[in-house]
């Protein structure tokens, strides 16, 4: 038999996952500084499969405005270049036969505003997941047998507090990421 504490624990896990997912998505959004996480979503056509870039090459950020990619197999240079150009990151790789360099151009004001919209979209998806976890948990609490009305009310309040705390975490992450993006 599941208890109210089990339901709360489950809700917290779901909400934690939603916040983590938002932070992971934020890491893929470009700011003024080079970060290897920027290329986490790039998939390369390698050996007949779509493979994450990090599994076919080492990615580094040796300077604040430069990313370098060192493929483990030089035969993949063209495929990696093609994958980066095909991604919607707006980056232009240059290939010297051994290494791919990606200079990060400064962000225009217009592009910064677009990126802020993107992170707000990611954040909204996270909020929806948090709300969904709350609704699901409240329904489970109602269906829990052998629980007094008072205990149910307390559990409902606890779920609401979890919900509010996780939404605040998402909002804090938005503020931080927005400041990074808008920083010139």
Image (cartoon, rainbow, N blue to C red):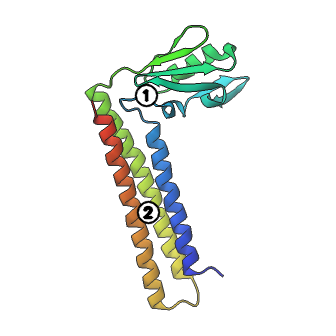
As measured in the structure, the alpha-carbon distance from the residue carrying label 1 to the one carrying label 2 is 33 Å
Check disc 2 and report its element: helix, strand or loop. helix
Quarter of the N terminus within the rendering: bottom right
Q: On screen, 64 above or below 158?
A: above
Q: Position of residue 126 (x, y in %)?
A: 44, 53
Q: Closer to the N terminus: mark 1 or mark 2?
A: 1
At 34% across and 53% down in the image, what residue appears?
A: 171
Q: Please tell me whether mark 1 or mark 2 is closer to you in this view.
A: 1
Q: Position of residue 58 (x, y in %)?
A: 61, 26
| Callout 2 crowding tier (Cα within 10 Å): few <14, some 14–19, many ≥20 | some
Q: 70 or 147: which is nearer to us?
A: 70
Q: Is residue 128 left or right of residue 56?
A: left
Q: Position of residue 56 (x, y in %)?
A: 66, 26
Q: On screen, 95 above or below 114?
A: above
At 58% across and 14% down in the image, what residue appears?
A: 99
Q: On screen, 83 above or below 40?
A: above
Check disc 1 and report its element: helix, strand or loop. loop
Q: Is residue 165 left or right of residue 39?
A: left
Q: Which residue is mark 2?
A: 131
Quarter of the C terminus within the rendering: top left
What is the residue that sits farthest to the top in this orientation?
96
At 56% across and 26% down in the image, what residue appears?
A: 59
| Callout 1 crowding tier (Cα within 10 Å): few <14, some 14–19, many ≥20 | many
Q: 172 or 129: which is nearer to us?
A: 172
At 44% across and 51% down in the image, what residue appears?
A: 125
Q: Which residue is mark 1?
A: 34
């Amino acid at each position: 038999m599941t208890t109210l504490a089990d339901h709360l624990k489950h809700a917290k896990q779901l909400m934690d996952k939603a916040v983590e997912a938002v932070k992971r998505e934020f890491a893929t959004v470009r700011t003024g500084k080079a970060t290897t996480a920027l290329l986490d979503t790039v998939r390369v056509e390698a050996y007949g499969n779509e493979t994450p870039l990090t599994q076919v090459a080492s990615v580094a950020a040796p300077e604040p405005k430069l990313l370098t990619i060192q493929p483990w197999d030089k035969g993949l240079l063209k495929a990696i270049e093609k994958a980066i150009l095909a991604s919607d990151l707006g980056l232009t790789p240059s290939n010297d036969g051994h290494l791919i360099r990606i200079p990060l151009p400064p962000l225009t004001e217009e592009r910064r505003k677009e990126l802020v919209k993107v992170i707000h979209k990611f954040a909204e998806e996270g909020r929806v997941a948090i709300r969904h976890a709350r609704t699901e948990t409240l329904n489970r609490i109602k269906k829990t047998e052998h629980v007094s009305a008072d205990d149910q009310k307390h559990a409902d309040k606890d779920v609401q507090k979890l919900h509010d705390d996780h939404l605040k975490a998402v909002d804090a992450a938005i503020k931080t990421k927005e400041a990074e993006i808008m920083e010139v």
